[in-house]
Each structure stands twice: as C-alpha cells, then as structure tokens.
C-alpha cells in the first residue's frame, strides 16, 4: 500500500530520523525487515515509542503488527535497527533484550490460571526488585492485593490484564509492549482494561498494539499505522482518528466508526479496525462481542 496515495504521512527512515531528533524516543525502530520461511513479512517498519505515555501500533489484520513486536523482541530473525534507550539491540537475543527492560504482555495475557494472584506475581519478580516494585503495583492496582489468594483463572479479563501488566512492572521494565489486550473482550471488560493501561502508563511507557479505536482514542497520544508490512503513517492519534477519510484509507474503518462521533468517547464504543481482509474499500467494522452478556469471568 502506498502511504502517499492514502493521504497518510509517508515515512522513510530519513523522515523519521529528523523527527526523532526533536522527540525523546525510548524505542526507535528503523527499516525493520522480517523474512519467515522465505516470505517477506516486514519490508521496512519505522516507529518511535516515546518515553512517556501510550504509543499505538495500528493496522488492519495481517498488516504486520504482531510480527513487528516479535521483531522488536528478537523472536523472529530480523534486520534493521532497533535502538532501545540509545543502544542498538537488533543483534541481541530475546533474553538479553528482556533483561534490558522491555516487558511483553501477550495477547492471551499468559496468566497461570491454577496459581493464585500472588503466585503469578511472584513468578515475574526480578531478584532484588522487592518492595518498591510491589509498592508500585499495589498503588496502581490495589485490587490485586485484596485478591492475592484468588486463583488467577477466576479473575475477570480486566483483572487478568492487571496481573499481566503487573508482572511486567515487577520485572523492573522500562517499556511495556501490550499486544491487543482487548481482543475478544466484552465492552465492559474493555473499559476495565483501558483503566489498567491508563494507570500503568503513568509509571512506564506503553507500546499498545490495538484494533479497538476507541481504546486508542482514549489512551494514545501518538500512533503508527502499518500496511502491508511497512509503516504507512505516523502522527498524533487524535488527528488520525478525527480524520474519517484517513481512518478509512489506512484502517478501513467507516466514517461512523473511525472518526470521533457521539459514541466515541470511551472504550465502550464499538469501533474496531476490520479483521477480515485488506480491501481498501471495506468499511464494515468487526462486531465486538457486545451482544454477549458480560460475566465476571469474561476473558
Ligand atoms: N510464522 C509465519 N509464517 C508465515 N507467515 C506469517 C508468519 N507470521 C505471520 N505471517 C504472515 O505475515 C503477515 C503479517 O502477520 P501479523 O500477524 O504480523 O499481522 P497483524 O497485523 O498482527 O495481524 P492481526 O491483526 O491479524 O493479528 C500475515 O499475512 C501473516 O499471515
């Protein structure tokens, strides 16, 4: 997909380099390329994650968001440049990268259902992190202290997300990558997850992979949009999401879903980037599970 043809902000490594100089980037990715099984998945992704707040990584299904995250984390062979806090990490193994402070909250949250909340947290604890890290977690999510002995599998989706994010904080991470934390959740739980991430981002910057545009609107200051394995657009999230034409072209979301509308003020709003294919003309939205009754165990 041609970013200029889309009316989005066309990017090149050079263009972003200039931008990066004026912006404090904690993570700076340039020309990230990934080939899996002979297939070129990423053709040159550029993105900056600022040192504060939430940066959203957007794109239609199959655009390359998860592969970008996996590339950043070294979970797939990659080339290009991944500067984390000024240090080149593209040749580092995943465990070395994680030790440097990049925390990953996977899409499925990865909690151990049979273990208690306290046990789940203990597993993530970095030796020596101790009381200050727990103090931060308890300050952000007092509920977890109350539920310390509860099996994590019996928590709501939002509470499980608290556990997943808390684990990244207990590990002393300086950046959290959250991969589609609202996928498959009922609207009420999406609201809980938004609150969780909002609180976490007060402490640690977040790269948020997300298709729920109401979440992005609520949480993210900046966004990067991928299309066909490349960066197609970057800029203020509010600017993109109030531009109906740009959201349609870049994300395939129709006017009433993408741009701010009367129902777009919170993550209960139902707009999601479409999930069924890359057609530029597709304007239907992926229906969220709004029709399902919410239960306390929805996850
Ligand atoms: N291990 C793999 N082997 C072959 N192809 C892959 C592999 N992983 C991803 N792909 C392909 O790469 C493209 C990008 O996939 P990716 O999962 O990164 O997209 P995405 O934007 O995260 O999509 P979604 O929103 O559906 O999660 C897709 O066409 C996918 O089929």
Image: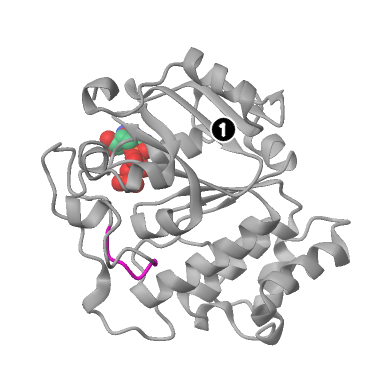
Quadrant field for ligand 1:
top left
Q: Main secondary structure of the magenta part?
A: loop
Q: Which residues are magenta?
A: 266-271
Q: Residue at x 50, y 32 (%)?
A: 71
The answer to whether residue 90 is seen in the rendering is no
Q: Under 8 Å from ligand 1: the CB of mark 1?
A: no
Q: 179 or 13, which lies in front?
A: 13
Q: 92 or 6, which lies in front?
A: 6
Q: Residue at the far left: name it.
A: 281
Q: Determine whether the residue tagged by mark 1 lies in a helix, strand or loop.
A: loop
| Residue 294: quadrant of the picture | bottom left
Q: Quadrant of the C terminus?
A: bottom left
The answer to whether residue 70 is seen in the rendering is yes
Residue for badge 1: 74
Q: 149 or 175, which lies in front?
A: 175
| Residue 167: quadrant of the picture | bottom right
Q: Residue at x 43, y 86 (%)?
A: 296
| Residue 287: quadrant of the picture | bottom left
Is residue 83 highlighted in magenta?
no
Is residue 267 highlighted in magenta?
yes
Q: Position of residue 268 (x, y in %)?
A: 35, 71
Relative placement, left or right, of 87 versus 165 is: right
Does 196 appear above or below 228? below
Does 56 appear above or below 170? above
Q: Residue at the far top: name it.
A: 14
Q: Position of residue 253 (x, y in %)?
A: 21, 48
Q: 283 or 275, which lies in front?
A: 283
């Amino acid at each position: 997909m041609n970013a200029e043809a889309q009316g989005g902000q066309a990017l090149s490594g050079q263009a972003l380099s200039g931008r990066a100089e004026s912006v404090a980037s904690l993570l700076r990715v340039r020309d990230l390329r990934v080939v899996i099984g002979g297939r070129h998945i990423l053709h040159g992704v550029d993105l900056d994650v600022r040192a504060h707040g939430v940066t959203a990584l957007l794109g239609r299904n199959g655009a390359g968001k998860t592969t970008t995250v996996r590339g950043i984390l070294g979970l797939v062979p990659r080339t290009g440049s991944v500067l984390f806090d000024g240090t080149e990490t593209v040749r580092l193994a995943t465990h070395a990268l994680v030790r440097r402070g990049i925390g990953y909250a996977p899409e499925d949250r990865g909690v151990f259902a049979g273990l208690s909340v306290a046990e789940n947290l203990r597993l993530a604890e970095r030796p020596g992190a101790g009381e200050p890290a727990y103090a931060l977690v308890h300050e952000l999510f007092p509920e977890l202290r109350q539920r310390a002995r509860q099996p994590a599998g019996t928590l709501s989706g939002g509470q499980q997300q608290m556990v997943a994010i808390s684990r990244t904080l207990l590990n002393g991470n300086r950046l959290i990558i959250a991969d589609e934390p609202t996928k498959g959740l009922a609207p009420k739980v999406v609201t809980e997850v938004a609150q969780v991430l909002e609180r976490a981002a007060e402490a640690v910057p977040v790269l948020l992979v997300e298709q729920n545009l109401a979440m992005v609107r609520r949480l993210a200051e900046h966004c990067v949009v991928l299309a066909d394995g490349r960066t197609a657009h970057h800029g203020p999230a509010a600017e993109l999401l109030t531009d109906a034409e740009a959201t349609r072209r870049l994300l395939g979301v129709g006017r009433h879903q993408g741009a701010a509308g009367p129902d777009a003020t919170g993550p209960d709003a139902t707009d999601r980037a479409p999930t069924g294919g890359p057609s530029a003309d597709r304007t239907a939205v992926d229906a969220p599970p709004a029709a399902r009754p919410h239960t306390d165990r929805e996850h």
